[in-house]
Amino acid sequence: MSQDLYDLLGVARDADADTIKKAYRRLARQLHPDVNPDPDAQEQFKQVSTAYEVLSDPQKRAAYDRGGDPFGGGFGGGQGAGFSFTDIMDAFFGGAAGGATRGPRSRTRRGQDALIRLEVDLAEAAFGVSRELKVDTAIHCTTCGGSGAAPGSEPVTCETCHGQGEVAHVQRSFLGEIRTLRPCPSCRGFGTVIPDPCRECAGDGRVRSRRTLTVKIPAGVDTGTRVQLSEQGEVGPGGGPPGDLYVEIHVAPHPTFTRHGNDLHCTVSVPMTAAALGTVVTLPTLEADLVDADGADESGLETGFELDIAPGTQSGAETVIRGQGVPGLRGGRGDLVVTVSVETPTRIDPRQEELLRELAAIRGEERPAAQVKATQRSMFGRLRDAFQGH
């Protein structure tokens, strides 16, 4: 190319960098192949691009002004040495300046975590228990040892990317050629292919299997608590390390006790005569659920206790038994809250009715006056009364 580079861009020899850039952009919009399909225009675009590459680089421009070869061996006709933004685009799309690449990705990856749900009784959640679980997860393929290749074979270098794991994709724009790196479609970015996959695992390096695990549930867990079993989850592809297994606890409802945090609540029903006269009732403890089904208690656990119902106990009265609740995960133990419910008989025989009427007469309660407790007035009601002088 013998034509003067300054003339190609239509700028003076003393033009500054900004003038040169504007001149190139103006010509590129006119001559780019996407805009102008004329073959002569394509050739001119290559020459203009080469001129801009030289004149936009201070060192190459100085060499050209001295009459030397700015490329150190002849112009490349706009190809190879042409202005293509390759290094810049590589830095944004996965490559690096100077032509460096990320390289192939490893076939060996960590496995996924797994989650299973386990239902336990309230006593088991409170005091802890060991359970055997049957888990269906991925394990290493024993046939290929996790490599994915059939016995006696091994992965080979990909012929498409030559082991790089990436291939270049060139796209032409009005600024020139833009080169980006994408994962190789032949090897999916691994850099190697398995010509003879293992027949047992189909080249994945792992198979699904059911295995039995023992999980220890600590004392004090509640619904939603997750117990972590490290490295007991899914084995990773390519013989990778396994993930973790999480056991999520669900506590089944109890026929007697209701749990609120670390406290237990229960309701005791007593006849009205017992509530009036006072009595003693026997209540089971949560430990009673741990006793063998045949009733033998060889553990020494306290399976029940006596609760005093004071004379005149009203329905809804609460008694707190300290330390009879659920043990906490970090120590300590909650309380047991017992609520008394006084039962009024709905059916009585003539003799019972006679005795009750006699008792009512003695107490002067044949026609008792209703005792209605005044509710607290609202703030607006008090303000209204104040304005009205009440």
Image (cartoon, rainbow, N blue to C red):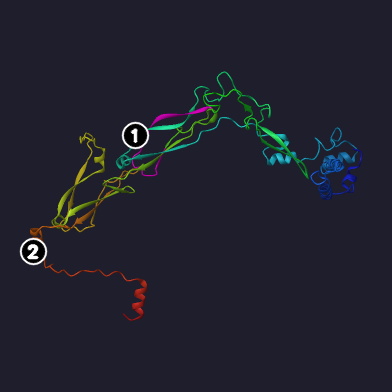
Q: Is residue 155 above or below residue 113?
A: above
Task: Name the residue carrying label 1.
Answer: 130
Q: Few, some or many C-alpha atoms within 10 Å of disc 2 (few <14, some 14-19, many ≥20)?
A: some
Q: Few, some or many C-alpha atoms within 10 Å of disc 1 (few <14, some 14-19, many ≥20)?
A: few
N-term-proximal mark, 2 vs 1:
1
Q: Is residue 353 above or below residue 211?
A: below
For residue 180, side relative to residue 122 (left or right): right
Look at the image and tell me whether residue 271 can be seen. Answer: yes
Q: Return the residue found at the far bottom.
A: 389
Task: Name the residue carrying label 2.
Answer: 358
Name the residue located 17 percent from the left edge and 49 percent from the top edge: 281
Amino acid type of the residue tagged 2 in the rendering: Glu
Which span is picked out in magenta? Answer: 205-227
For residue 196, side relative to residue 339 (left or right): right
For residue 386, side relative to residue 2 (left or right): left
Q: Which percent across, then down, holds residue 148?
A: 55, 25
Look at the image and tell me whether residue 329 can be seen. Answer: no
**Residue 92 sits in quarter:** top right
